[in-house]
Structures are given as C-alpha cells and as structure tokens.
Image (cartoon, helix red, strand yellow):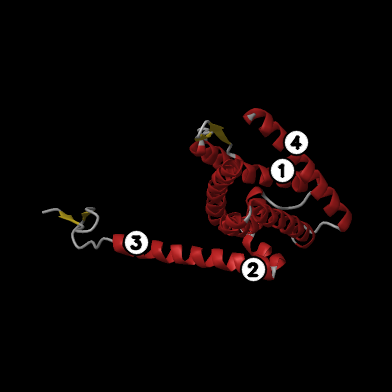
Amino acid sequence: MAKYCANCGKKLEEGEVCNCQKQIETSSIDFGESFNKIINLIKGMFICPSKTMKEFKEESNFSLAVILVFIVSLLTGLFAMLVVKTLYEATVSTYTIGSYSVVSTVNIPYFKIFITSFIIAIIAYFLQALVLYLINNQIFKVNLNYKNTFNILTTLSIFNFVAIGLSFIGILISIYVAIILIVLAAILSLICLVIASRDILKLNDKNTMYSIVLYLLMLSFISYIVILIFN
C-alpha cells in the first residue's frame, strides 16, 4: 500500500522519510541569515563603506541584491504617491460661490503613479549597473562582471532606503525635509561610488574622475530619453 507524507502529500517509498519539514527549516534559516545580512549591510555602509562594498560585491549576494532593489523600488513608488498627495493638498484651490465654498477636485491616478515609479526605479538600478559595468569593463578594462557591479551599486541603494524611510516621517513636518534627506542620500551615494572606484575597481584619481563623469553623463542622457518616453 502506497504511503504519503502527512504534511505535503508526497508519495513515499517503503521506509522513506519525507524531508519537507527539513526544507522548511532550512528556508527559515536562510531568511534569518538574509535579514542579518541586510542589517549588517546598513550598518556597514555608514561605518565602513569600503570594506562593506568589497564583501558584498561577491556573486553569491546577487539574489539578495535583487531583493533589496525590489524593496527600495517599492518604497520609491509609495513615496512618489505620498509626495504627489502632499503637493496636491498644499495647492488645492478653494472657490467661493455666494455663501458656499467649493474645493476644486482632481482625480489623481495614485496607482498609476505607484506602478510607474516602481517600474522605473527597478529598471534604473539595472541600467545603472549596466552603464557602470560597460564604462569600467570596456573603457578602463576593470576585471569585474555585471553581477559584481550590480552588487556594488545595490550597496549604494542603502542610502536611498534609509532616506526614503525617514522621509515618510519627515514629509509630515515639511516636504523640504524629505528633499534634504533625498539629496543627502544622493551625495553619500556619489561619495561611496568614488570610494568603490578607487578601493575596489583600483582606478587612479584621474580615471576615477573620468569614470564618474562619464557615468553621470550617460545616466543623464538615459534619464532624458525616459522622460521623453513617459511624457
């Protein structure tokens, strides 16, 4: 008579023991390790960014890097909705007709804003990694593959992650607080990109400057094209 696992329903041979519970336990451990890696990554980027980027650039961290990009992009979409809502509420017009006050209303496509911002953010991270990879691999002959480059850029997204998280609170005070936090995140990311170019990619000061300038110019051009597409 055929035997089946009481937990997952898998058909078992005579004397066979199902390993489904062991797989569940392993998954839980992996999740815990991934969470600890993210926490250590956040700490490391503020304490010792050079060492943290060197460790996280390994290909084994690529899956975790993709998850981090997904999370940051999700927060970006939610933050975009919050910014639009805040700006709309601050600029909504009130008209007086006789003894009645009429508030002008506009149907804001919040869901579309969220989806568009989310998708653009994800594409942007992968494109940034591709641009940086092509510049350093093809022009400066740096021995670094795409996954390594993507992982390095993902470490920089930690600043956006923290800035956007704080901005959800800061925007309640003033939208300018949120803007300052986002700008600070961009500055920290650029500084760490310079550090990565020197300590990890081993570029000299001159090539580091050329690499960063070329990287920013190419991103500006791509951003311009994206704006034209979505405009």
Residue type at numbered disc 4: Phe
Nearer the observer, disc 3 or disc 2?
Answer: 2
Distance from Cα at disc 2 to Cα at disc 4:
32 Å
- Please give the label number shown on residue 24: 3
Distance from Cα at disc 1 to Cα at disc 3:
39 Å
Badge 2 vs badge 1, beta-carbon distance below 8 Å: no
- Please give the label number shown on residue 221: 4
Distance from Cα at disc 3 to Cα at disc 2:
30 Å
Within 10 Å of disc 1 (Cα), the crowding (few <14, some 14-19, many 20+) is many
- Please give the label number shown on residue 44: 2
Distance from Cα at disc 1 to Cα at disc 4:
11 Å
For mark 2, give the secondary structure: helix
Within 10 Å of disc 3 (Cα), the crowding (few <14, some 14-19, many 20+) is few
Residue under pointer 1? 131
Badge 3 vs badge 2, beta-carbon distance below 8 Å: no
Nearer the observer, disc 2 or disc 1?
Answer: 2
Question: Residue 37, percent across and down?
Answer: 54, 65
Task: Between residue 199 and residue 79, name the one nearer to us.
Answer: 79
Residue type at numbered disc 1: Val
Badge 3 vs badge 4, beta-carbon distance below 8 Å: no
Residue type at numbered disc 2: Gly
Mark 3 / mark 4, whichever is N-terminal: 3
For mark 1, give the secondary structure: helix
For mark 4, give the secondary structure: helix
Residue 128, image quadrant:
top right
Residue 94, image quadrant:
top right
Mark 3 / mark 2, whichever is N-terminal: 3
Mark 1 / mark 3, whichever is N-terminal: 3
